[in-house]
Amino acid sequence: MTEMTGSERALAYLKGERPDKMPIWHESVYLAWQYSGVPDLRQYVLDPEAIARGHINYAKKFNVDITGVNIDMWALYEVLGAEVDVRSHVVQPKIPAWRYRPDRSIYERFKKMGKPENYDPRNCKRAKALFKAWEIAAREIGDKVLLRQGILGPAASIGLVVGVPEIMRDIAVFPDLLDDLMETITGPMMDWTVDVAYKMVEAVNFTNFCMGFSVYDKGLIDDQTRNILAEIDLEYLKRVRDKIGWDIPITTHICSYAPDLDFIYEKFGQHINEMQFHSPGSTYPLQNAVNKFGDKIPLCAGIDHLGTLFAGGVNDVESMVKNSIEIGKKSKTFGLGPGCGLSYGTPEENLMTVTRTRDKYGTW
């Protein structure tokens, strides 16, 4: 088989085909910053050229097939009121006043959002830089590497801005808030997240859209809430599909400790092109996932980014990747990936070992 580019390899995998090699996905925010040439994070997160350069250099150095171009999870949500403290080496959320006392006005603001263009994330400096970085990366390496970009659904987006415990507290304090919240989530917030999803996909030349399913954790929400959220997310996913086109693959992100893969496949399986999840390291072993879904949908997993990849030696990493490949080969197709973003300080040699081991054993 002719050597494929990373993008060709990834797209073949997402079609349920077996490419020349199993594609490798890395999510590298702070690691990519290390390869940008900009030492201060406060400068980096506002510099689209540096953001793009860091991720491009990272993708080339470690020969990855799939990557995201990101800075942190709050950049897109600052336009909705999320606040962060950008320090020299870390971006962390600020604690808003409503974390300490119920404040009905924040929900009124969401309810009165109006048209999506009223809250275009590109009106904020960091998100504007991020959109520009996506365009630069897509132009320079988009034909070689699949750029995975996505945003949470409308309910999870409000949860990220306000805080899930705070929302649950406020519903108890304001008994009629739940009805207003549902109206907001299925109305203006739905419109906003669909619009932002389209803008993100447009920025990376309509190659894929990544749907976040991390909220579907067996230990996180009860059955009733899970089903309500699923109906909202299904409507969201359908609307994104209609807006970007049904031929564009939907990648996924399921970075939970107890991923509810059975529920996700049951509810969303017909609308997504893969299931990426945290294994090893979660309560859902890779072997179980392959046995249950390996003949139905592409799976992306197998790299323990919090344990072996970060703290193990080269031999440990090679053994982990080889074992995951052997299990993954029982699927109709398979991709190697971590559960979530790679940790700052992950040894370069370990990252190199993932690719070397894939090249040696991960061919079909």
Image (cartoon, helix red, strand yellow):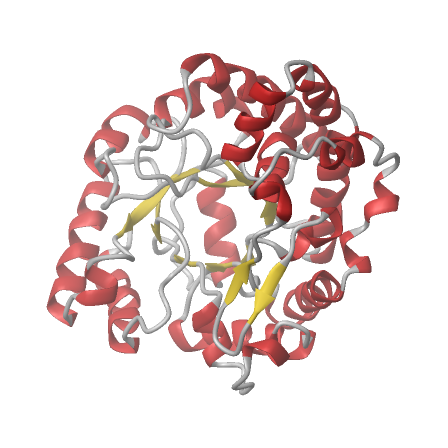
Residue 2 image point, x, y percent: 42, 61
- Which of the pair 77/343 is nearer the observer? 77
Q: Would residue 210 be seen by someone viewing this image from the given angle?
A: no
Q: Is residue 43 left or right of residue 262?
A: right
Residue 240 vs 56, above or below: the answer is above
The N terminus - image quarter: bottom left
Q: At 46% from the left edge and 33% from the top edge, which residue is drawn? A: 215
Vertical side of 277 occupied by 4: above or below? below
Q: How many numbered badges does the structure rendering display? A: 0
**Residue nearer the viewer, 135 or 333:** 135
Q: Position of residue 180 (x, y in %)?
A: 73, 19
In this rendering, position of residue 188 left or right of residue 161: right
- The answer to whether any part of residue 146 appears in the image is yes
Q: Is residue 328 above or below residue 318?
A: above
Query: Where residue 11 sits: x, y (%)?
Result: 52, 48
> What percent of the width, then of the height, locates residue 245?
72, 36
